[in-house]
Image (cartoon, rainbow, N blue to C red):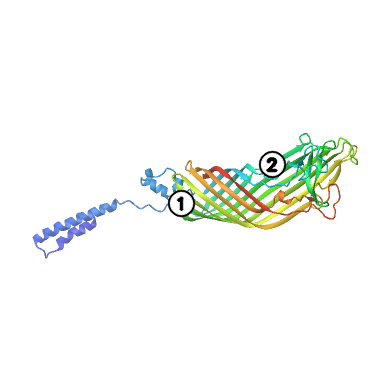
Amino acid sequence: MCWLCWLLLSLPAAATAQSWGESSSSDSSIADEVAELEELLEAGRNRPTEPMDRGITDWELSSESGFNESLDAFAPALLHGRHGIWVRADSLLWWSSGFAAPPLATTSPVGTPAENAGVIGQDTLVLMPNDGIVDGLHMGGRLAVAKWLGRRELVAVEGVLTAMDEIAVSWSANSDAFPILARPYFDQASDLDAAMLAAYPGMMAGGVRVDATSRFLAAEGLLRMIFVEMDEARIDLLAGYRHQRLDESLAVSQDSFWPEAQPPILAGTTREVSDLFDTCSRFDGVEVGLMYETRFWRCALGLNTKVAFGKNRSTLGIDGSTVTTVPGAEPAVFEGGLLAQRTNMGEYQWEEFSVVTDVGVFLSCYVTDRLKGVLGYSVLYWPNVARPDNQVDLSLSQLPPESATGANHPTPVTASSDYWLQGIRFGIELDY
């Protein structure tokens, strides 16, 4: 018996002013109190000790307390999917907006006079499609890496890289399939539509080829902060920097062969005429956005919205050449083609303010406690972009290899248009 009990039992013996009957009654009452105290002390010794702050997670406590049977086996979902580092790799299946080139190749029925052959509006068929160049479906990839900071993991740094495969489109026609081939233009001197022949029966044989390319790349550096977090939902704020670029080109070439002499052209003469319009648009700006995510079972459904404000730096390069080869002589190279001549050849740059919008929805589900699959749909819109079709001037004041006249056409055109990408993404995300 503890010292407290001994003290309480000794008190009745020290009381001399009580009678024997009273002492017996008092001893019985005190014994009951002592028994009650002993029960309380015993209960205190058996009371479980509170766990010390040793970094035990909620998941460990729930497992030790025996309640883990009622919890899902996927711990990261219960812990809101946050770990020190996560990496996501996506495959992209996206559609892009093409550009609408002007009429680049035409044909006319056999028997059409040479002066009217291939001229727009003269019973002429445009062979090269003038819209939807480099549009359609193509593949790409996206890699994202992020690290949560601090013990509470409320802020993360994130890097994202998006790259699309280059789209390359080629079209060609020759005089075997189309005896009359021409390249249309607008004649400044006569103020009428005209055409330069590439092939004509009894005069020359030849062909026309058009090549176009397009490639997109984007990089983002973001700071992610958890703004609102509930049991089944979360809202993150995003802020950072965005860089992206679009490189495109449009090239037109023709080759002609004179099997018979057409004074002053000698028999066997060949001529190759080429035009190249190369554009590059680069965007740099500040990006803000938010991510909303709602969780259910082992999955999460979310919306990701980002808007970037910045400057577009556009570059246009125009180049052309004409190579004439006469039998028995060295090729003669002339600077300038048909649509790219000395009047507009060179490199040009300009800047414009632009706002890039990137919106996506996604569904992610845990496959293991660290790995989940992701499926989503994204839309990216980018205005004020330099595209090759807008830089072509069909008005000509001379033909190669003639020298430039006073009108100095074609002239350089620095115009802008819009660009968009949209499509599905699917990939995996690893937390560790």
- On screen, 347 above or below 330? below
Relative placement, left or right, of 146 versus 187 is: left
Q: Which amino acid does label 1 sit on?
A: Ala
Q: What element carries label 1?
A: strand
Task: Answer with mark 1 or mark 2, whichever residue precedes in sequence.
Answer: 2
Residue at x-position 46% and y-position 51%: 233
Q: Which residue lies furthest to the top in this view?
A: 176
Relative placement, left or right, of 248 versus 332 is: left
**Residue hosting label 2:** 168
**Residue hosting label 1:** 233
In the foreground, 173 or 159: 173
Residue 367 is situated, as x and y percent measured from the top left of the image, at 48, 41
Q: What element carries label 2?
A: strand
Residue 414 is situated, as x and y percent measured from the top left of the image, at 73, 54
Mark 1: few/some/many CA within 10 Å (<14, 14-19, 20+):
some
The span from disc 1 to disc 2 (Cα, nearest Å) is 43 Å
| Residue 233 visible somewhere in the drawing | yes
